[in-house]
Image: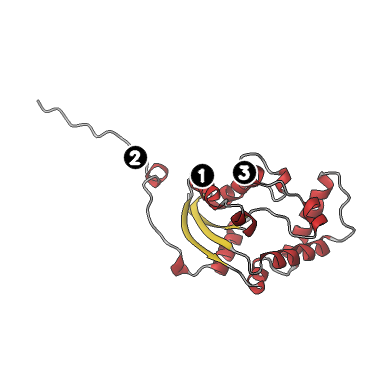
Amino acid sequence: MKKERTLINVKSEAIQRHLIGEMISKFERRGLKLVAAKLIAPTAEQIGRQYPNNDSWLIPTGAKSIKGYVEKGVEPPAKTPREVGRWVRQSLIDYFTDRPLLLMVWAGPHAVELGRKTVGATNPIAADIGSIRGDYSLDSYELSDGLGRAIQTLVHASGSPKEAREEIKLWFKDSEILDYDLVDEKVIYETDWGKVRRKENNA
């Protein structure tokens, strides 16, 4: 199994609530390895590159938001998925610009899938207990829209290996990503770890 990399961003609302350590611990306990990290205050241009202004991002994002309303029995906005996606994108740009953001790259087998499972469903109120959003957020699309702000999901995780590669390139140079060994990787990647080496009795 080839090791993957995924981008995990701890958002400003989580930083304000002193949840950085809790989140890092979640990914460490999963068995993933931290290979890059930095704290920045992104510009609107940088956030705009993270959330692209094209239909391949806008329409699925808007559709997901509308679906969240329907599943909760709430009347969705009278807008197309593209229009909702544009509103979501602008809300994200406004919300993240000039606020602290902790960027991290985590590596390991199935890193992208495990990252998504660890953070939980995008709509925090629907996220499973045990996930980051399920344990630490009470936000929802209805609440955030009513307050006129982006939904507080606490953390971002890449959605696919392709997306992870693209997102990592946005925020990190190759020279900023480390390659090092962890002792517990022997348990995952080596087949003879922990075997007892018995001395032969030649007596």
Residue 146, located in which quarter of the rendered image? bottom right
Q: Residue at x 39, y 42 (%)?
A: 187
Residue mark closest to the camera, 3 vs 2: 3
Q: What distance separates the C-alpha of mark 3 from that of mark 2?
A: 31 Å
Cβ–Cβ under 8 Å for marks 2 and 1? no
Which circle marks residue 30 in the picture? 1
Tag 1–tag 3 contact (CB < 8 Å):
no
Image location of residue 137, percent across then percent down: 68, 47
The one nearer the camera, 113 or 84, is 84
Q: Callout 2 environment at 10 Å: few (<14), some (14 to 19), or many (20+)?
A: few
- Of the two numbered discs 1 and 3 on the same chain, state the one appearing first in sequence: 1
State the residue position of label 2: 193
Q: Which residue is mark 3?
A: 131
Colouring style: secondary structure
Tag 3: Cα neighbours inside 10 Å, few (<14), some, or many (≥20)? some
- Residue 94: percent from the left, percent from the top? 72, 67
Q: Mark 2 and mark 3 in contact (Cβ < 8 Å)?
A: no
Task: Please say if 1 is above or below 163.
Answer: above
Q: Quadrant of residue 134?
A: top right
* Amino acid type, label 3: Ser
Nearest to viewer (mark 1 / mark 3): 3
Element type at marker 1? helix
What quarter of the picture does the C terminus occupy?
top left
What's the residue at 76%, 62% (across, down)?
Answer: 88
Residue shown at 68% from the left, 66% from the top: 51
Q: Amino acid at mark 2?
A: Trp
Counting residues from the start of the chain, the first of labels 3 and 2 encountered is 3
> In x, y percent, where is residue 176?
45, 67
Question: Sequence order check: which comes first, mark 2 or mark 1?
Answer: 1
Work out how far the residue at label 1 is from the one at label 3, CA to CA, in angstroms: 11 Å
Looking at the rendered structure, the secondary structure element under dot 3 is loop
